[in-house]
Each structure stands twice: as C-alpha cells, then as structure tokens.
Amino acid sequence: MASKSTYTIGQQAVHLNRHMPVRAVMMAVDRDVAMHDHEFHEIGIVRSGEAIHRTAGGTRRISRGDAIVVCPGDAHGFSQHRNLKISNIYYLGAWLMADVRNFWDAAGVVPLFVRRWLAAQPIGDVAVARLLPDELQWCEHELSQLHAAEDDDHASLLYARACLTKVLVLVARAHARSVPGVQTMSFRNEVRVMVEHIERMVEQGGVLHIGKLSRAAGVTPDHSSRLFRQSLGVSPMQYFQLRRVQQTAVHLMDPGVSITQVAMRMGFTDASHLWRSFRRHMSVSPRQYRRRFIAAPK
C-alpha cells in the first residue's frame, strides 16, 4: 500500500487569500481518495459515515466525531468509505500564527498545532483526535459560522479567526486526552520569557542575539537552547528565523507594500536576503507566494 503522496491539493481548489485565509467545506466522499498532501493546513472533522484513513504511519478506521489534523506536506487518503461526510477547514498557518502567544495556555494546542506550525519539514504523520459529543456539536456550530462568513460581505477576519481558534482548542483538548502527559504539559518560565523576547524582535524587525536572549531568561546560552528545543522542537534561532518568515508571509499579502519594503520592515538586509530565507522555509519565492495568495476573493 502506497504511503507517499500522489498529488497535491493547492490554491486552484481552495482559493485561500488575504480576504479569506480560512475556509470551511463540506465534502461527501463517494470514492476512494488516493494519498495526497496540501499547500496549506487542514482540519477534517468526520460528520457521518466511516472509512479507512491511510497515512504514512499506517491505517485506522474513522467515524463520526474523529478530527484529522494535517500539515502542509503530510500525506493521507481514504478507502473503504461508507456514507462518509467530512467538514474540512483549510487555513494559512502564517496568518493564524500572527501572535503565537495567544495559543500558549490552551491545553494541548502547543504540542498538537504550534510545534507542527514550526516544523521546517512535514511532521511525517497525521494526528487523529476523538471528539466528545458536546465537542463535536460545538465544532459543527463553528464550522457553520465559518461557512456563512464566506458569503457575508460584513464578516471580519477577526470573527473567522475566533471561529477557527475555538475549533483548534476543542480538537487539541480531545487529542490531549489520548496522549499521556499532554493535558498537564506546562512550560518553564524561562521558555515563556524567551518566546516573548523573540516575538518582540520579530515585531520590531530586530536581530536576535542569543547572549541577550539567555540573559533575559536568566540561563546560559547552552541551557536556553536545550530548554527551548524541549518545549517547541526547534532552537531559539530556528524559531526566530521561521517566525520572521511567517510574519513576512502575512505582510506579503498586502498589495500596497513592495517586497523590498517588507524586507526592510522585517529586518532582512535586502530583498535577496528575504528571498533566500523565505524560499528555504516556504519552498516558494516571496513573489510566488504573493501571486498565490493576494488574489481577489472567489
């Protein structure tokens, strides 16, 4: 059984953009779905029916109440379907993570979502969480609100972000119940201080100095790196570089700002420096990203 992706679902199918960087789509699966990946993040919530869900890590039967968390590059597919209906939420991680600190204290969100958003490469497998009946009902409500917002000219991105965030928290809570230790996972104050320091540097377009970061947290440089990696899966410098690129992606969706202006705002030495860093983390150039997501709403 093939475990690698055979095709990629991209913008031509979903149409995420600066006007609506999150969409909810109800799908009735009436045929086997080959292994595939996505250019964006996805949460799939099974509304009815059942099927065999295939990932790089193996297979499992899914049914009503299962929530599937998929990151860009992660492959999955479906077979042996029976009246399967899934609501998919597609979203741009860079937009949602504009301020990652909003997710810090929600049980299970950091290990299930934040660490995946920060991964330089695909995680390698797709997480599945089992929602309780009341959690599924709340998710279904937020899904209906997201879907309605797409046709509402007065709907705000703040409203869409709130709906998506509530679904993330519910799915993370469900996932935490099945993973020992995640529900009670907490992060040392030194790590929180370092995250705050790095986020300020990114917001100011500054440069990260590991010595200053370590002193702010009250630990040695080596110890700061170990603590940070244990909590978030990346080093402080890797976190800084990726967060700068993610914030750059958000600014690139503004058609009124040139790529050179974005580079200066985010602290890159020039547009070439931005191009190299952006392509390394996002696998496309800043110009390609801008063309992909700056389009008018469909």
Image (spheres, rainbow, N blue to C red):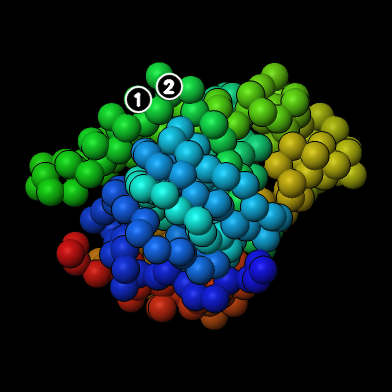
* Residue at image coords 28%, 29%: 141
> Dots 1 and 2: beta carbons under 8 Å?
yes
Label 1's element?
A: helix
Quick check: can you spot residue 298? yes
Residue 265 horizontal side relative to residue 213, left or right: left
Quick check: can you spot residue 120? no
Q: Residues within 10 Å of mark 2 (few under 14, many from 20)?
A: few
Per the image, the residue denoted by label 1 is 137
Percent position of residue 166, x then y: 40, 30
* Residue at image coords 42%, 49%: 82
Label 2's element?
A: helix
Question: What kind of residue is marked 1?
Answer: Gln
Residue situated in front as seen by the camera: 251 or 266: 251
Percent position of residue 31, x then y: 40, 63
Residue 26 horizontal side relative to residue 250, left or right: left
Indicate which disc residue 133 carries: 2
Mark 1 → mark 2, Cα distance in angstroms: 6 Å
Question: What kind of residue is marked 2?
Answer: Pro
